[in-house]
Image (cartoon, helix red, strand yellow):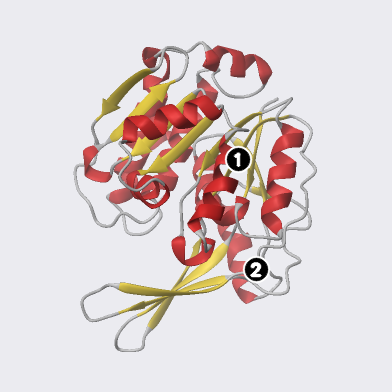
Amino acid sequence: MDRTLVIGEALVDIVRRPDGSTTEFVGGSPLNVALGLARLGQSVDFATRYGDDERGHRITAHLASGGVHVLAGSTTADHTSTALAELDPAGAAAYTFDLMWDLRRVPVPVGTGHVHTGSIAAVLEPGGTAVVETLTAARPGATVSYDPNVRTAIMGDLDLARVRIEEVIALCDVVKASDEDLEALYAGMPVHEVLRHWGRLGPALTVVTRGADGVVFRVEHAGEVASAPTVATSVVDTVGAGDSFMAGLVSGLLSDGLLGGPQARRRLREATLADVRSAIERGLACSGLTVGRAGAYAPSLAEL
């Protein structure tokens, strides 16, 4: 079981500057993770929804260039979703989304040992329910990871979103979130308490990224918590840094036999902080390289 299935949105980010000029980039958090995992040597299938149009063709080419296999049915949406970021003179962005997420339940490819999802894919309907159904069906034979990647402008009522997010967390072995995600979902709750709460729901490993302050991570087996510093030496921008960390973390856990099927799940359940630290360090190495480049750069194994 050597394949990884990533489920989630693929879209085009449109950046409009104060002078009216625009630039477009292929984006979407799950897309970035899929590409990151493929660049790190994993065999990746990607289940998504975008159109058979000019923007969709750019997404297809972008994924193909990184070795990601797009599953059948992913390119039959009415149109490709977009996220318009309008910049003010100070560089702050106001977002407008044209987003449709109508995924149906995904047949899990033979040989899939791990499934990852994230961002709006599990929350926005009608596709969110299909994601939960797919994870539930895949879980007996595959490990599961999740990055909530909270987007308040899209997810609507955060009380309702939190219910769905925790439903997905309960299906997972690994959950990674940012400190901004935690503040949106559990305002004022200390990081350690959120990680303990999530661990009780199901995951064996929970991680919070904190930008320049590195990461905090917890293993449920012994209730141990540790931190690790960032390794970034220069920062051009932070676009895609969390997705790059997620790809590195999952890649490292797969390489160490802590993800990738029921036996790996049992090993992760018994893991110590020392057992997962190398995967944490791979995630930090990936994000450190990403922030040193413009955009959502996905490093390769050779660069680590």
Please name which of the two marks, 2 or 1, marks the residue nearer to the observer: 1
The first of marks 2 and 1 along the sequence is 2
**What number is the disc on residue 5?**
none
Query: Which residue is at the front of the view, 195 or 294?
Result: 195
Q: Badge 2: how crowded within 10 Å, few (<14), some, or many (20+)?
A: many
* Residue appearing at x 71%, y 60% in the figure: 126
Q: Secondary structure at mark 2?
A: loop
* Residue appearing at x 34%, y 50% in the figure: 180
Classify the position of the C terminus by image quarter.
Answer: top left
Where is residue 166 drawn, in percent x and y? 55, 40
Q: Is residue 203 visible?
A: no
Where is residue 57 drawn, in percent x and y? 64, 68
Classify the position of the N terminus by image quarter.
Answer: top right
Q: Amino acid at mark 1?
A: Val
* Residue appearing at x 54%, y 40% in the figure: 146
Q: Is residue 84 left or right of residue 19?
A: right
Where is residue 124 drawn, in percent x and y? 62, 59
Q: Is residue 179 visible?
A: yes
Residue at the disc numbered 2: 100
Residue at the disc numbered 1: 168
Asked if residue 299 is positioned above or below residue 236 in the image, the reply reads above
Residue 59 sits in quarter = bottom right
Query: Which residue is at the front of the view, 165 or 144?
Result: 165
Q: Badge 1: how crowded within 10 Å, few (<14), some, or many (20+)?
A: many
Residue 91 sits in quarter = bottom left
Q: Secondary structure at mark 1?
A: helix
